[in-house]
Amino acid sequence: MNVAKFTRSIALLASLTLITACGGGGGGSKGNAAAQGSNFDSGCTGFCATNSPAFLTATDVGTVISRAVQEAQMRGVNATIAVTDRVGNVLGLFQMNGAATTFTIRSTLVDTPSVSGLENLAILPSDLAAIAKAVTGSYLASEGNAFSTRTASHIIQEHFSPHETGLPGGPLFGVQFSQLPCSDLVTDANNAASSAGIGIGPQRSPLGLSADPGGFPLYKNGHPVGGIGVIADGVYGLDRNILDNDNSVDELIAIAGQFGYAPPVDRQANRITVDGRSLRYSDVDSGDLLSNPANAPAFATINGVLGNLIDDNRADPVTPATPIAVRNYFIAANGLLNGSTFGMPNSGIEDADVIDATLFPGLDAFVLTDGAGNNRYAPRDAVVAVGGNELTAADVTQILRSALGVANEARAQIRRPLDSQARVTISVVDTAGNILGIARTRDAPLFGTDVSLQKARTATFFSSTDAGTVLSAENDVTYLNANGTASTTVVDFSADYVGSVASGKGVRAFLGTDAALANGTAFADRSGGNLSRPFYPDGNDLVALPNNGPFSKPFVTTPASNSWSPFSNGMQLDLVLNGLVNHLAGGVNATNCVSTARLSNGIQIFPGSVPIYRNGVLIGGIGVSGDGVDQDDMISFLGTYRASLALGGDGIGDAGDMIIGNAPTAIRADNITPPAFAGQPLRYIQCPQNPFINNNDENVCDGK
C-alpha cells in the first residue's frame, strides 16, 4: 500500500466531513481529525517545540473556555473549567453561574457511606478537580503521544485493562499520587516572586494526576501547549469499564473546548498499544457535540454574564460549606494569562547545551532551570556521608550521561511514530533523598519529572537498613468523613504496614521475617510495587480474596466490604494524606508530603528505579519515568551499569569495589519469596526483550 497516498486520502475525507459536521450537532464524525480541529499526523517527533515555538495566548485561553461554556449551555449544565499551559500554570479558571461548588470523590469500588482514604470525601471545591484534570491532560502529553484523563484511568487500576480479571495492575499503577501540592520538586506559580501569575515548571496539581474523564491536552503546531479540565457532574471518579460508552458530560464539554487545539489523531492514545491493547483516549468526539465550537462567542461577552473567572478556593476548616479564596493556583483579578513557551526560560525546561554545553554533550538533553539561565539540579556531591563511599558530582554526571545514552538508543513504548527514541526524565538522589541531579531527554512528558524523583527516593529508602524504623515513626493518619470531620478510622504505620511476624500483620509478617526493611535488601520500584498491589502475585484475583500485598489495602468484590480503590490504595496514599488534606482543606502550602524528608514528594509504586551501591554500601538511587515501565527499568539499571563501566568498574557495587554499580546480586529483592506464595518471588527489574532501535540485541539486562 502507498502509505502517503492513503494518508492523503484520509485527510481529504476528513476535510469533506468537516463541512457537514460543523453545523452544530452530531453527524457521524467520530474519529474525524478535521472535525476536531486537528490533523492526522503532524510529523512532530520532539523537535517542533524548539523549531516552531508556540504557547497558549490569553486569547487562546478565552476561546477554549468560551467553546466549552457554549457546549455546557446547550446541554443545560453548568461547569467549572480550567486551562493550563504545558508546565501546569493555570491560565484561566472559570465557573459558570449555578455550577456545583464542591464535588465528591467516588470510585464505586467502595460503598458510598464508607470511609477509606479519599473515598467519598465531599467538601472539596470544584475548581481543584478542574485544575487537576487540566494538569493531567498537559502532563501526560508530548509530541509523540496525547493522553487524556480517561487514558490515565485505563492505566492506574487493579487490572490492565480495568474490565478484565486475572491480569496485572495498570502499567502506571500509583501514578495518580504524583505532582502533589506538598512535593518539594513541583513549584507554586502564585508566590511573591511571580507577579505575572505564572512561574517555571513543573507546577503542582491539587489532587495529583486525575483519572476522571474530562481532561485533555491542548496542541498548537503539532506539539502540546497546555490542557483543559472540566467538571460539571459533581463526581470525581474513573472509568471502571472501558468497553462501554460513558457519554460523559465532562468529556463532551472538554472536547468542545479542545476544538481547534486537538492533538494530531495519529498521536492520540487509541493509536498507541501497550501489552497488545490500544489505550483509551475518549468516549466522545466533536461529532457528539450539540454546539458548533467554531461559532462560540468571544470570551469577553460571557465573562461576568454566564459565569466568572474565580480564585481557586478551599473548604474553610471551621465551616466546610463556606469556601475561602486562597489563591494558590489562579488569581481572577489578573484575568486570563499567556502561558509559557516550552523549552524557553519562562517554562523552566531548557536545552542543556544552552545552559552548559559541557555537561551532557551530544546527548540532546534538557534540564530544569530557574528561568534565569541556571540549572536547578546540576550534578553535585552527596549531602550525607556514607563512610567515604558517597556519590560524587562526577559519579552523578556519569550516571545521568549513561542513562541518557540508554534512553536515546531505546525504542519508545508509548510514542508515535514507531521506532521513536524513549523520552524520559532521570533523577539521582543520595541516601537522605537529596536531589543530586536531574536530566531529561527531548520532549519527555512532564509527569515523569516528579515521578522519576519519587522512584529514585523510593528505591533508596526501602533498600536502607532503617526503613522499618522510620516508617514505624510516621505520624498516624485519621481518615475523614464525607463532610470533612475526623472519622474513627486511624492508620498506624508501625502496626499496619511494618508489623511483625508475631502480629501476623505488615510487611514483616508477609515476608516471614522481622528483619524485613532492616536487613539491607535491595528494593527496586518493581519490588516495592509487588508489595503495594491489591493482589499478590500482581493480578492474581482468581484465588480466594483478599490476598493483597502488605502495603496495599485488601480488595474484595463487594463494595460494602471493600476498602481498596485508586483513591485509597494503601501506604502510598496514607504516607501523604496528612499533607495533602492540609493543603486541600486548609490551603496549607507544605513542602514535605511525608514526615521524613527522605520521601519528601511521596513514594511511587510502578517500575523504573534501582538503588546504587559502592563497596557493598547503599549510596543512593536512580529513578526514570516517561515511557514504558520496562524501558524505565532498563534505563535506570543499564544506565547505572554503563556508568560503572565508564568509571572503571564491573557494573556491580560489591564489597571491595570502590566504583559505583548496581546492587550485589545476592541482596536483590528477587531472592525473596513470601512464605505463603511458593514459587512467586518478588521481582527486581524487567527489561524489554529487543529494546534498541539500531541493533537486535536481546535480553540486555541479563547477567548484570
Image (cartoon, rainbow, N blue to C red):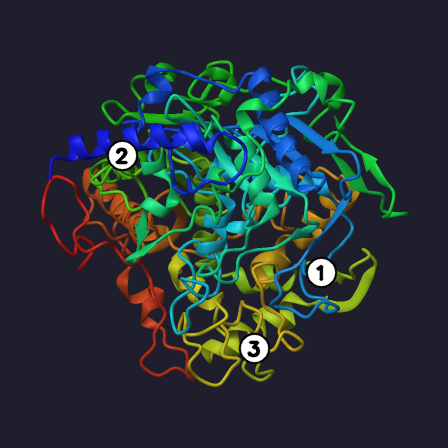
Tag 3: amino acid: Val
Residue 525, can we see it?
yes
Judge left or right: residue 47 versus residue 292.
Answer: left
- Tell me which corner region of the image, top left, top right, bottom left or bottom right, holds residue 626: top left
Disc 1 or disc 2, which is closer to the eye?
2
Disc 3 or disc 2, which is closer to the eye?
2
Could you tell me which residue is drawn at 35 percent across and 52 percent down?
629
SS for dot 3: loop
SS for dot 1: loop
Above or below, comparing residue 16 to residue 518 in the picture: above
Tag 1: amino acid: Asn
Query: Separation of disc 3 and disc 2 at Cα?
Result: 47 Å
Query: Separation of disc 1 and disc 2 at Cα?
Result: 45 Å
Above or below, comparing residue 563 to residue 214 in the picture: below
Give me the disc on residue 10.
2
Could you tell me which residue is drawn at 81 percent across and 61 percent down?
486
Residue 380, can we see it?
no
Between 578 and 228, the one nearer to me in the picture: 228
Tag 2: amino acid: Ile
Judge left or right: residue 205 versus residue 651.
Answer: right
Could you tell me which residue is drawn at 65 percent across and 78 percent down?
561
Between 34 and 611, the one nearer to me in the picture: 34
Q: Earlier in the sequence, mark 1 or mark 2?
A: 2
Q: Position of residue 76 (x, y in %)?
A: 71, 41
Q: Are marks 1 and 2 in contact (CB under 8 Å)?
A: no
For label 3, count other residues whose C-alpha is less than 10 Å away and answer few (under 14), some (14-19) or many (20+): many
SS for dot 2: helix
